[in-house]
Amino acid sequence: MESIAKTTLQQQFPQLEPLLAEEIANQSTLRQLKEGDEALRTGQYIRSTVLVLSGLLKVYREDEEGNEFLMYYLEPGSACALSIMCTARSEKSQVMMKAVEDSEVILIPAHLTEAWLAKYKSWHNFVIASYRQRFEELLQTLDSVAFKSLDQRLLFYLKRHIKVSGPDIKLSHQQIAYELNSSREVISRLLKKLEQRGAITLHRNSIEVHNLDSV
């Protein structure tokens, strides 16, 4: 395993105090993930808290037929709040986590994250902020599913994606359909309408976003 550079860690997590950053660099593990690699599976015991150093990961639910339901993305400088919670309680994961692009994640052993809550104020604040952020994202996702039509959900999905990865969305229509629990034909038709309105340009396995606010 590669070592964790303290300077890189402090750049991505500036809110963590220097002594804590040093402990993370010295006592945690750096894991490289290729695009498509699974970082977490449903039913797996979580032994480490996950911090994202680079790249992009998605956290999602999967049903028995393999259909996906996107919960939220994890970008550099963020933590998986569910991994923190399950690590603390020695519980099995109820979600999946996969690398959307080549990524680097930091794996912090469970016994350290528990001890740091009392030892470091910055870690305590970071954990609480992570819980709050993911909870708010889950509420937005729930609102999207419960109260919006599919075309509105697609807009919400695209806006959330460009927020974390920019206006060039490297996803196929089929991938988007999986995450919105729809069919490729329906998603393709809705995307074509957005293209006709000048909001996006469709490419092979990617979408270039221009302006979704005008739709």
Image: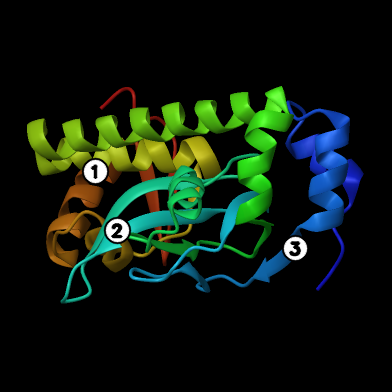
SS at badge 3 = strand
Q: Tell me the kind of residue under disc 3.
A: Leu
Name the quadrant of the C terminus: top left
* Above or below: residue 67 compared with residue 137: below
Mark positioned earlier in the residue sequence (1 or 2) = 1
Question: Is 67 placed left or right of 9 in the picture?
Answer: left
| Mark 3, residue position | 30
Q: CA distance from mark 1 to mark 2?
A: 9 Å
| Residue toward you, 46 or 111 | 111
Q: Tell me the kind of residue under disc 2.
A: Ile
Q: CA distance from mark 3 to mark 1?
A: 35 Å
Q: How far from the left and from the top, in percent, is residue 109?
A: 66, 58
| Mark 1, residue position | 154
> Badges 1 and 2: C-beta atoms under 8 Å apart?
yes
Q: How far from the left and from the top, in percent, is residue 124?
A: 61, 28
Q: How far from the left and from the top, in percent, is residue 83?
A: 48, 52
Task: Name the residue: 80% across, 73% down.
Answer: 1
Crowd tier of the residue under label 1, counting other residues whose Cα lies within 10 Å: few below 14, some 14–19, many 20 or above: some
| Residue toward you, 37 or 113 | 113
Mark positioned earlier in the residue sequence (3 or 1) = 3
Mark positioned earlier in the residue sequence (2 or 3) = 3
Task: Name the residue: 84% across, 69% down.
Answer: 2
Name the mark on residue 176.
2
